[in-house]
Image (spheres, grey):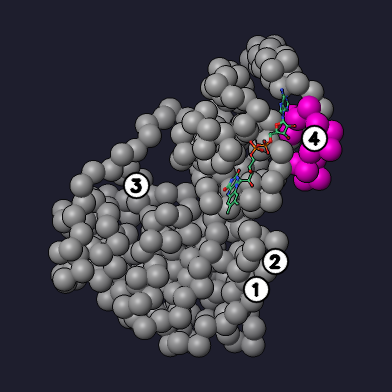
């Protein structure tokens, strides 16, 4: 019997949605591990966030609240996470930039085997079987980890976020562990964050994504649609590389993995590297003038049309519909 520890991701004074996907993975892994799960909140000012994770059935909420943890660096966070993780059979987090950066270091410190970016976990005769995407999601590999402590990250788009199950998990303070020499070689300089009123891609329920075809009119065409749908905006790598959209808009194998309820691919051909980042979307709509574009192999709804005509028309129709149902 072993317990699981979920390391919560905190940003801008909130627990990030991806944490709830990591909780779902931990709960599933417990079918093999047999124990309970706890949640670690680590950062500065995180004590006030216990309420955000207290109702999910965790045995404990472990809180490491320290002013020196105000700015994340893996070197500063990993020693504490590893120390807390020593009491667990599985230490996991979401496979966001945070989880991808932090958890391999935690695994290194714990001498633990690591399974990154897991798409599923199951019970293989009392062992956790990890399912991991390979070759841009075109194949899956399965593995078990054979070390006493296992470390893993959950692909957010593959695990529905855990729902509160009631009750109130007790909170317990844990002390920060001195970070050691590695942290002295790293200095936090600044965080350059794109501030947007729009939902962050990994949290958005609707995403409107644009491709190279939009050229310099990327925002001019997509913003009205994103406004009427209250959606996030994404982009193909070609659109980002050409400078039509900022690089943190990129969806795909080397960008963000998203799984909204509704995903619009506008002027996007559907290269496998793009598809790897959005194929988990519940409903996919494409607008492309080429009826043979590969994106149509994936879509629930497709419109073969010139996007510069179709998107403004769609916006007008959606506005009328909104006004009529208001
Ligand atoms: C290692 C590696 C990693 C990569 N990672 C990513 C990644 O993370 N994300 C990603 O997106 N790509 C990634 N790529 C790039 C990927 O292979 C494609 O090149 C890219 O996705 C193409 O972007 P696009 O669909 O916008 O452009 P294009 O392939 O040029 O497609 C443009 C589409 O717009 C349509 N179109 C043109 N004009 C109009 C119009 N007026 N109205 C309607 N439709 C129109 C065309 O028919 C075409 O289908 C990666 C590539 C490599 C090698």
Q: For ligand 1, tell me if the residue under mark 4 lies within 8 Å.
A: no
**Visible residue check, residue 31:** no
Towards the viewer: 183 or 62: 183
Q: Is residue 51 left or right of residue 135?
A: left
Gap between marks 1 and 3, in whole Å? 32 Å
The image quarter in which residue 156 lies: bottom right
User: On the rendered image, what quadrant is the C terminus found in?
Assistant: top right
| Secondary structure of residue under mark 4 | strand
| Residue at image point 25% right, 69% down | 80
Q: Is residue 156 left or right of residue 97?
A: right
| Secondary structure of residue under mark 2 | strand
Gap between marks 1 and 4, in whole Å? 31 Å
Q: Earlier in the sequence, mark 2 or mark 3?
A: 3
Residue picked out by circle 2: 139
Callout 3: 10 Å neighbours few (<14), some, many (20+)? few
* Residue 47: x %, y % from top left: 25, 54
- Marks 4 and 2: in contact by CB < 8 Å? no
Callout 1: 10 Å neighbours few (<14), some, many (20+)? few
Q: Earlier in the sequence, mark 2 or mark 4?
A: 2
Whether residue 303 appears in magenta in the rendering, the answer is: no
* Residue 65: x %, y % from top left: 21, 58
Residue picked out by circle 1: 141
Q: Looking at the image, is 322 positioned above or below residue 287?
A: above
Q: Looking at the image, is 269 positioned above or below residue 27?
A: above
Gap between marks 3 and 4, in whole Å? 35 Å
């Amino acid at each position: 019997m072993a317990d699981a520890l979920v390391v919560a991701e905190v940003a801008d004074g909130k627990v990030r949605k991806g944490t709830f996907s990591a909780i779902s993975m931990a709960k599933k892994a417990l079918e093999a591990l047999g124990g309970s799960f706890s949640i670690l909140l680590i950062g500065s000012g995180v004590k006030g966030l216990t309420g955000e994770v207290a109702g999910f059935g965790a045995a404990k909420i472990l809180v490491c609240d320290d002013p020196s943890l105000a700015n994340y660096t893996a070197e500063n966070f990993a020693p504490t996470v590893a120390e807390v993780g020593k009491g667990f059979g599985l230490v996991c987090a979401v496979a966001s930039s945070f989880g991808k950066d932090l958890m391999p270091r935690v695994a290194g410190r714990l001498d633990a085997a690591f399974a990154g970016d897991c798409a599923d976990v199951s019970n293989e005769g009392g062992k956790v079987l990890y399912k991991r995407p390979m070759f841009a999601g075109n194949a899956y590999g399965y593995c078990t980890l054979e070390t006493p402590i296992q470390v893993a990250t959950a692909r957010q788009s593959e695990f529905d976020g855990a729902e509160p199950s009631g009750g109130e998990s007790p909170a317990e303070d844990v002390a920060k562990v001195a970070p050691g020499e590695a942290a002295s070689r790293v200095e936090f300089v600044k965080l350059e964050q794109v501030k947007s009123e729009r939902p962050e891609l990994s949290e958005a329920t609707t995403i409107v994504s644009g491709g190279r075809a939009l050229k310099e009119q990327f925002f001019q065409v997509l913003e009205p649609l994103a406004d009427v749908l209250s959606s996030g905006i994404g982009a193909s790598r070609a659109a980002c590389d050409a400078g039509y959209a900022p690089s943190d808009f990129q969806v795909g194998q080397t960008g963000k993995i998203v799984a909204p309820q509704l995903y619009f691919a506008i002027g996007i051909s559907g290269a496998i590297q793009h598809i790897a980042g959005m194929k988990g979307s519940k409903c996919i709509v494409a607008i492309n003038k080429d009826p043979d574009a590969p994106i149509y192999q994936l879509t629930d709804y497709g419109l073969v049309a010139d996007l510069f005509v179709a998107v403004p028309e769609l916006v007008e129709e959606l506005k009328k519909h909104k006004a009529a149902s208001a």
